[in-house]
Amino acid sequence: MSATNPSLVEFIQQSRRGANANSVLGPEYLMKQSYFTVDTSTNIFTSTFGRKIWQALNNQVRFFNAIQRSTWGNTVGWRVRTDRGPAGTGSTTGGRSRPITETGSLPTIDVSNIQTVSSLPRIVGTSFGVSVKSIFTAGLEGGAGDVLAMEMENSQLDHIKEVNEELLAGGAYLCSDGAATTFTVPASIAHHYKIGDAVSQWDLSDTSGTWIRTTGSAVSGVDTATGIVTVATGTTFANGDLAAIYSRAGFTSIDDIVSFDGVRYGGVTGGTFVTGGGIRAYDYTFGGRTAAGDWNAAASVQANAGTGRDLSLNLIDTAIQNIRINGGEPKLILLGHDQYYRLERLLNTQQRYFGEKFIQVGVGSEKTFEGTATGLVVATYQGIPILPDADVAHSVASDDTVLGTNVYVLDTDYLEVAIAQPTQFYENRDYFAANALVVRGLFYTMGELRCYGVNRQAKIIDLN
């Protein structure tokens, strides 16, 4: 590992080595209205700034704040019951539960099918650096001020954005171009692929109906300006192929969870594969699932084969109905701002009037005539809160056109972000390790998105 790009462990060790370094600028150049020495013995940065960003995460009006958070606990997995035994189909003895005549035989003796789910914490990190010279000159007359504090504040916002983006990242998109080590997706959605993600390929020209590129699939670079994603050498991607994330380096996204085998993205039909990345999240080996309708493939997904259509109340009602049939109760409707305004217009016809009130609105030094306020701002649908979020994943049409955002209907009782370590901050002044006179900082959070009831979640894709 190079000195300028250390691992998390090495960065922390460097921070400890450089904690007692003498500075020509004095100890207070790193502090903001504080007279305490900033080093690892007093832990000022971790206790103050780490707590500040963790508080900011919890107070953002975003998807992260809409679902419950819990401590990780003493577990790396759990068990789920996936069926209740024989259903009686094709059997002369019937299922394990059935009527019994007075002298009839007993139901078939069987045990429940139990599967293991594993979940390990993921780490999200945000780093920054400020040179010693810039710190000194920024404090002089005409300078920018406390550049270290400014860069720290910006890094906090970046860290918040990254966590939220990962929780809402899409999982499968069509390639508009491809090569042996690269494939191209629309630039506006390229950020859904992260370095370290493992990508599988559905070859449009392969009639065997199987997923390929199970090795050499790790993402090593993402160009969000051009949409080019770089992977290791392997089977060549081509225009029209599907590039699906089956293992994430960061947090599992809600799009990974709300999925099922063979769901159609952009008109491409997947095989026995949890399209969208749910394999890693729920401990299935790549391509290992053969049974249709397993417990983690039971989410409701309303797709339209890569063809955009308008959001309708019927689509939302169907999602709500499917969740309730499976024993859940929707607690949240999550969508992008585009679908939020579409839903507003749909619900305008249901507006009810509770009386008449005249108002005047000031425009500069003038005022409007007295009149009534018009328009409808919705907060709920059928009593379910509606949360718009700018990071919600988009669908992509079969012609590579980026469509509208997806709509998720969720029972959040079965969702949680399990936190192994709340956001930590480390400041690093080990100039020899960095081989530069630079003060470096790092925020990192360790956790994972968990779902205990996949069949109680739903989503609507392929929307205009």
Image (cartoon, helix red, strand yellow):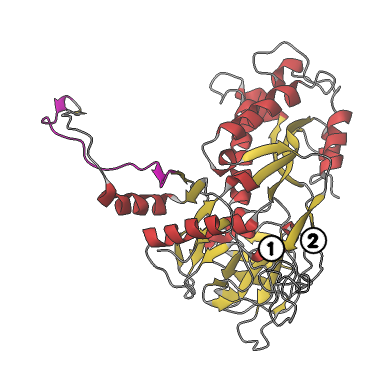
User: Between marks 2 and 1, how big is the CA–CA gap?
Assistant: 9 Å
Determine which residue is flagged by label 2: 115
**Three-letter amino acid code of the residue under disc 2:** Gln
Q: Which amino acid does the dot numbered 1 rest on?
A: Trp
Q: Residue at x 12, y 30 (%)?
A: 370
Residue 283 is left or right of residue 380, and the answer is: right
Q: Pointer 1: what residue? A: 295
CB under 8 Å between discs 2 and 1:
yes
Residue 45 screen position, x and y as percent: 73, 24
What residue sits 42% from the left and 62% below the top? 315
Residue drawn at x 56%, y 31% as measured from the top left:
59
Asked whether residue 328 is drawn in magenta, I would say no
**Going 68% across and 68% down the picture, which residue do you hit?**
99
**Could you tell whether 235 is left or right of 462 in the image?**
right
**In the rendered image, which quarter contains the C terminus?**
bottom left
Q: Is residue 187 left or right of residue 11?
A: left
- Left or right of 351, for residue 146: right
- For the view shown, which residue lies furthest in the left direction? 369
Please give the range of residues in magenta. Answer: 365-383
